[in-house]
Amino acid sequence: MKPSSSKGSVLIFIVVLILIFGVLGVIITSLFRTSTISSATPNQARRAYYVAESAMRYAFSELRNSDFDTAVINTLNTTTYNVNPEGNFTVNIFGPWFDSDETKEIPIGGTLDLKVPEGKLTADWMAKNPNGLWAVNYDYLELDETSAWDVITGWTQIDDTTLTITVGGNFNANKDNRICLAVRPTSDQTIIDGEDLYVAEEAKDFFPEYDGTININRVDYVYKKLHHEPANNRVMLEKVSVSAMPNVETPPSISVKNTGPWDLRDLIVLSPRNHIVIPTATSDTVTVAGTLDNAVNIFDLATVKPMTRNPDIDFNREDLDTVLTPKATNPDFIGIDNTDKTIDIGGGPALAADPEFGSVWFNANQNIGGKQEVCNAGKCQFGVGVRVFFTLDYSGDAAGLTFALINAAHNTADSSGGDLGMGELLGYGGDSRTVTTDPNDASDFLDGSGTGLPPPKMALEFDTDTDSDNLNFCSGSTKVYSNRNDPDLDIVNQDVVQYVFWGFNSLAIPCRDYRLDPAPTVTDHPTYDDNQHDDGVGFGQPLSTRNIKDKYVTSEDAAPDVLVAGVIVTVDSRKDWLNGGSSMGPWAVRLEVMRSQPTQYEYTLHAWIRQCDSTCSNLFADHPFYADTRIEYTETPHLAQTIELSPTEHTEFDSFLFGFTGATGSGTYQSAVIADFELSFIRPNDPIAGD
């Protein structure tokens, strides 16, 4: 029960508790280890004690009933609860973990400012000696990355919710990265569920004495009690258990190392699931002080909450003019709005007269989770995969766009596909020629070389001008139009969403041959079938990467209420359903690419597309995890495909670039506005969730 104002009103719940404690006070077991009560009459002291006890139990009840909801915690932390007569209490729900207040690469002996996201620092917390504790960037990709953790040599309080730590070595953090405290195990240990774990002595001042949670290699554990063993210079965590925690995986045993190379030694992390409840209670002139001696820890057993961790790359937080490299036949074809944080691929009706194409790639250096330059000049380490979310507000009639991941072994942020005479390539296939006649100079290619976008690569294609069942590129020396062999749909040129990869590694297309003097005539054009679809039997090299013709998402039934991916949506035209409807807003797109370990070469793609209202508030209300790229989304994908690369291709895809490509034909136009773009790298044991 919450008070009606910041001063509070009489809480029946608390009054009843106080009456019960008044009768049974001699047999009530305190939650506190000790208590500090100012001198006064025994009745006043006892009443203040009961108010503090009630405050603790009330806070526990509110936390558990709300699944530790942030809004509830903020209310508890900012409210004075009155208990008549002449009594009141406050609580400080303090999270013993922090968020980086700056993006910084910290040298040896450097400092980092940290914010307290939950509650306030206390004087007795800051008086503790942090020397020997470790700071861990909890957003780490791999904990063997040494710049994701470092030893703390000191700290200084700035205000109630800010402190500065000093570290002994190199440490990296981005703004709002979660920073946790940790200790080393005392030795190599392997224990089973329910056994004891021995850790460094520094834990005694910072880890909860009772019912604390720890995290080891992204697996949560709970221990029953902390025992300090000064004679052995260590701390024992009693009865460490994994079975009660909502982990993605439950290991049969716990193995930790404290020998060998530093990057292979384990850290025992004080989990962000811990919440220290610190009450301050007053009865008349008697106060139970709000100190750690009067505090009790409670841990969060709730399953993952949506949008609680920031994406690794968020265009809403980036300077798009700096981190994006657009390249197009017309400078207006790729529009970047750094105020609204959007990308417009197409330029709208103003560019309808002439064919155009282009691409835009992420092109920046980025530390992720403490790891140095996970992205360098836009070339990002693929690791075990990525998750992507963006909204697409499309208008126009051709030709479409792709969201593409291209290997960084053979591509850069200056790479481009496309062909001015073949809008159907969508800027993804083709050699990037910017003339409709035969090229005769390197300047006739958008990429300056005629290379195009070499494989391996993959894309989610939004095709708004589907072509017929034609696999022929040329009729003599003349190009054959409509040669993408797109799906056989009910309506000609109906919008469709599909995966595309690449086709043959060598391809003769005589009507695209050219010669750049003094070099010989170029007769091999391997990128021109990269978004051409197969006949359902087999196509391309290797066969597993073929662009499957009959795997797609499109509209069914009659407008305005059509089915897209089995869900009723509102559109003005079934044929041009990506244009949406006058009463509805953009499409929300989610893509996950899971990359296998080095000894295997599989890539599993899952994609979803859902219609939004103007702000997508309807989508986020009904599907709260849909836009969260830090979780594995468990709802059935609308498009799913697994491909297998060769060992060489897999190695070439160790790093990738990401971005968008698009094209229009003569007399057609499009405006494809991309907003709310997010990308996160998959981590082992990431939370999983569905709607």
Image: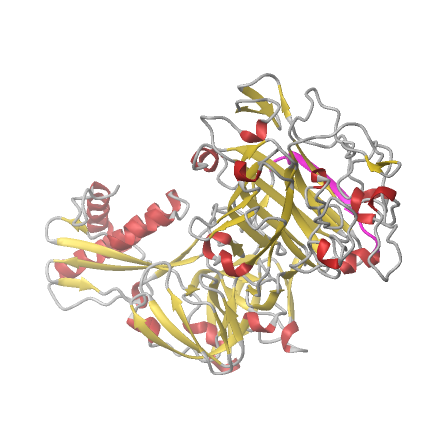
Q: Dividing the image into 4 quarters, which one contains the N terminus?
A: top left
The spot of residue 331 in percent (x, y) is: 56, 51
Q: Is 263 above or below relative to 50?
A: below
Q: Residue 97: within the magenta?
A: no
What range of the chain is rendered magenta? 635-646
Name which residue lies at 60% across and 73% down: 146
Q: Is 158 in front, or is 126?
A: 158
Can residue 690 be seen at all in this image of the molecule?
no
Q: Is 184 above or below relative to 420?
A: below
Q: Is 170 in front, or is 89?
A: 170
The spot of residue 683 in percent (x, y) is: 61, 56
Question: In the figure, is residue 380 to the left or right of 628?
Answer: right
Q: Quadrant of residue 394?
A: top right
Check the image and tell me how it is coloured.
secondary structure
The spot of residue 495 in percent (x, y) is: 64, 29
The spot of residue 409 in percent (x, y) is: 74, 62
Question: In the figure, is residue 79 to the left or right of 325?
Answer: left
Q: Quadrant of residue 292?
A: bottom left
Can residue 132 be seen at all in this image of the molecule?
yes
Q: Is 109 above or below relative to 410?
A: below
Question: In the figure, is residue 249 to the left or right of 57?
Answer: right
The total of numbered circles placed on residues is 0
User: Looking at this rendering, what residue extends furthest in the top direction?
Assistant: 558
Q: Is 518 in front, or is 591?
A: 518
Q: Is 278 above or below relative to 131?
A: above
